[in-house]
Image (cartoon, rainbow, N blue to C red):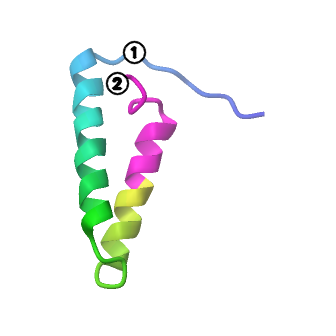
Amino acid sequence: MQSHAYITVPISYVNAANRLIETSEVIRDSMSIADQQSLHARLRSDIDSVKWFDLGDER
């Protein structure tokens, strides 16, 4: 069983994380995977990591 450690962060951090997720998703989705495979994978990983920590779910 996984245990999640929760921290309290200011709402401004949550809002900033949400904006970064939204911007990153637009960039990721508009990129050619074949041309930008490395950056595409990094963006996907970063987005998933932030969402995993629930910072991207406070919309």
Q: Can you say whether 15 is above or below 10 in the image? A: below
Query: Residue 50 occupies which quadrant of the picture?
Result: top left
According to the image, label 1 marks what residue? 8
Of residues 21 and 53, the one nearer the viewer is 21
Question: Residue 40, how many percent across, how many down?
Answer: 35, 68
Q: Residue furthest bottom?
A: 34
Point out the stretch of residues depicted in magenta. Answer: 46-59
- Residue in the image at 46% along x and 48% along y: 48
Query: Residue 2 occupies which quadrant of the picture?
Result: top right
How many neighbours does mark 2 have within 10 angstroms: few (below 14), some (14-19), or many (20 or more)? few
- Residue in the image at 34% along x and 24% along y: 59
According to the image, label 2 marks what residue? 59
Element class at badge 1: loop
Of residues 1 and 19, the one nearer the viewer is 19
Query: In front: mark 1 or mark 2?
Result: 2
In the rendered view of the protein, which quadrant contains the N terminus?
Answer: top right
Q: Can you say whether 4 is above or below 41 in the image? A: above
Q: Are marks 1 and 2 in contact (CB under 8 Å)?
A: no
| C-alpha span from label 1 to label 2 | 16 Å
Circle number at residue 19: none
Q: How many marks?
A: 2
- Residue in the image at 32% along x and 62% along y: 29
> Left or right of 29: which side holds 23?
left
